Amino acid sequence: MTAAVPPKGTGPLARREARLAWGLLFPTIFSVAAVIILPLMSIFWISFKPIELADLRPPAPVVRESLRGRPAAAGDMAEVEYRLRNSSQQEVISGVTLSDAWPPGVTLVGDLPEGCDLTGQKLFCDFGDIDPGFSDRFRVEVQVGQAFFDWGGDPEDSEPVVTGSAQNVLTNADFTLENFHRIFDGGEFWSVLGVTLAYTIFGTIGALVVGLFAAMLLNREFRGQGVLRGLYLFPYVAPVIAVAFTWVTLFDPTSGSANELFVRMGLTDTGINFFGQRPLALIMVILFEIWRYFPLSFLFILARLQSIDDDMYEAADMDGASPFQKFWYLSLPMLLGILSVLFLLRFIWTFNKFDDIFLLTGGSAGTRTLTVNVYEQAFAVSNIGAGAAVAVVIFGMLLLFSIFFFKFISREEGL
Amino acid sequence: MTSLRQGRFVAPIIGILWLLVIATTVAVAMSFATGAAFRPALAGSVLIGAGLGVAALAVGNVWALIGGGTVAAFLLTLAGFGAVQVGEGVGLGGILLASVLTGIGAGWPLHSMLDGHPVGDLTRHEFEEVVIRFLTGFGYVFFTAIVVIPFYVMVMTSLKSQQALLANPLDFTVDLGAGWDLFRSYRELFQDFHFGSYLWTSFYVSVLTVLITLLFSVPGAYAVARLRFTGRAAFSRSILLIYMVPMIVVALPIYIAYSVTGLRNTILGIVLIYPVTTIPVSLYMLQGYFRGLPSEVEDAGLMDGLSRLQVIWKITLPLSLPALASVSLYVFMIAWNEFLLAFMLLDDPSKFTLTRGVAMLNSSEVPRQHLMAGAVIATVPIMVLFLGLEKFMTRGLTAGSVKG
């Protein structure tokens, strides 16, 4: 009899479990790959492409058919007109062909244009290459017979079919470094980076400090604590678009209540353009960020505070610790873990933030961050390639943060 | 330092600082409520604050403090030295109301801050206790003000007319005589700007997002939480990594892809993409919860002949209903509030979601009160959900890490 040994490797049960696990994960992996990973990879491709917003509509031949001459009776003459044009002003379209089915009773009288051929009632033309901005008319003289009127349909119902192929900027092998040149050119990039870092650092720290203060306030039992906690979460729960526009309305230079209040209080004589002048706009945007996200840090810090054991505070009381000493030597060290995790996460998310600044200032008056710059380059300047290049820069910086983050958070959370 | 930590010094200083807080609060509140000019003044605050501070040490009766504060505020205001000064056109009633508010706001908190402390040396504990009470009081006033004022302005602006707003931006008094006409902006939004259909679009897009998200993330979360397979640790980490990718970076290629395939300007395109932005969060939240469930119950189910999928359906899901509620609410909130993708991918006014519809109102041709009415319409449903189900919502927010 052999001695019992534990099985080695993966047994059939373990394999089945792993198969089931991957099966359950497949929908998630698939969708995330399709919507997040694939676009992320394509952004690198696009950033090396000389592509503009207009290039998204690929060049194509366009044709319009019309029957002219209003034939009224059998034997009347008429003209079939085809108007062919190239939708692009830059690209040549090659191999352009046109095929169209003529209604019954229509017979050819004059000459066909060059490259065209009529078999039965089927017209087929081969125009070869057409130049950028090409637009021309072809007319064919025809005679209309009785069969046409018997048929009774509208000859313009049968759409002519055109084919043709053109270079597509998205897929051809045309690469350029122009996009990166453009975004790193001049001092603009560095000022954008500076604004981004100022926004991120002050916004994150501000939200943390204010959140810590709010958590301290609510970390005691009293009537109405639940109500206040709910109230203080409002800024975060409300749609960003609603609160951002409210801030814009509130701080409007001419009809804003805040300005009116300041004027009445004698703090200022004329309206202050809060979101329109440097560096006030940046300060306002940072204040908005703090205002909107302090609820989140406060929620986390409060949860951590409430899980601290009371015994410790009792022991500290016995030892005669004063309230500030208890905060400084007991609460704060206990909160250090959650505070640093919150700082790292919020740092990254503030860095990624787009909506808030876009809605408040649109990136004007010295508030253009990297994320807003993506939008500006791609849609305001219509240069998608340059926008993608900025996105690549953002992604690179995030990768750096993430490496740091995971080194750190793995220790904190034990992930 | 020790010599300064005496009741006779600390009390007036705390009193003055608190009076400044209260005077500012009362002035702002009165201005917003009546539209007239009120402003806090240093001289009056110092006089009343110092007096009340010292009095709070000696007088134990809170009503005496409130009464004294009110009378002092009223008389000083009439004499032109009040803590809250009034501009022209404020009647005696307004002054009286402001004085009473100042009296209550100053007397009562100062009583609870300073009562029972000696006039002479304070111990370190007593001194810090006073400071902490002052900071606590300041905190409540400060946070309530910064949260309430914007929402107050939002709601009140939506009820005003353009002329009234331009004439006096501070005047938020509502003319109740106007009756239903007060809600004119709302009526016009629903009649002329199709807000009814936007509301419906937002609603069903959000609900679909929640359903699809749960459908995808429940099995995934279960697999990560319970099943053993190689790559599990790496997988649960990369979930977090995914949700650090900024939306704008992904939105650009998606915009291109949608333009080429014709999915732009379709609700289908939006419904395809919203759930993917929420699946990672939801998976992360749910796997944390599933791990906390006792696996013995599931093992018992397996022993009794259920398959894994049946175990998930019949045992795990019913046990995790609270977590599912939290996740659903959280995902609903994200989808409802989503702005960037809707803004980039939808141009056709007949297919807007609510947030996109509100963004459309931000133009110089649309009056401000319409914009604010739109903001209110977008905010109210999510607020009702939040207040009604706050327990679940708060848990969802906490578990959802710090997605923003």
Image (tube, helix red, strand yellow):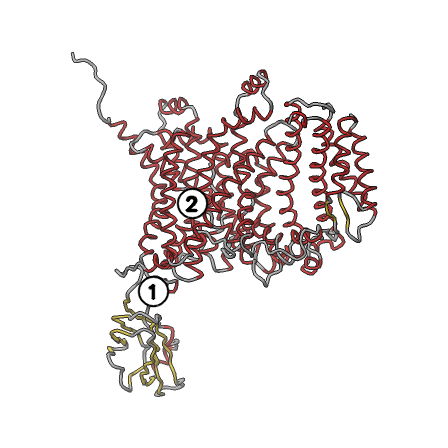
Horizontal and vertical percent position of residue A30: 34, 44
Per the image, label 1 sits on a secondary structure element best described as: loop
Tell me the kind of residue under disc 1.
Answer: Pro
Query: Does A281 sit above or below residue A231?
Result: below
The chain to which mark 2 is attached is B
Horizontal and vertical percent position of residue A190: 42, 53
Indicate the quadrant containing the C terminus of chain A: top left, top right, bottom left or bottom right: top left
Q: Which mark is residue A349?
A: none
Residue neighbourhood size for the residue with mark 1, other residues' Cα within 10 Å, grouped as few (<14), some (14–19), many (≥20): some
The chain to which mark 1 is attached is A
Question: In the image shown, does B43 or A413 lie closer to the viewer?
Answer: B43
Residue neighbourhood size for the residue with mark 2, other residues' Cα within 10 Å, grouped as few (<14), some (14–19), many (≥20): many
Q: Which mark is residue B277?
A: 2
Q: Report, in whole angstroms, how far the alpha carbon at label 1 lies from the one at label 2.
A: 29 Å
B376 relative position to A352: left or right: right
B326 relative position to A224: left or right: left
Query: Does A212 sit above or below residue B82?
Result: above
Q: Residue at x 47, y 59 (%)?
A: B347
Per the image, label 2 sits on a secondary structure element best described as: helix
- Which corner quadrant of the image does residue B136 belong to? top right
Residue under numbered circle 1: A58
Tell me the kind of residue under disc 2.
Answer: Thr
Horizontal and vertical percent position of residue A367: 50, 53
Q: Are marks 1 and 2 on the same chain?
A: no
Q: Residue at x 70, y 48 (%)?
A: B32
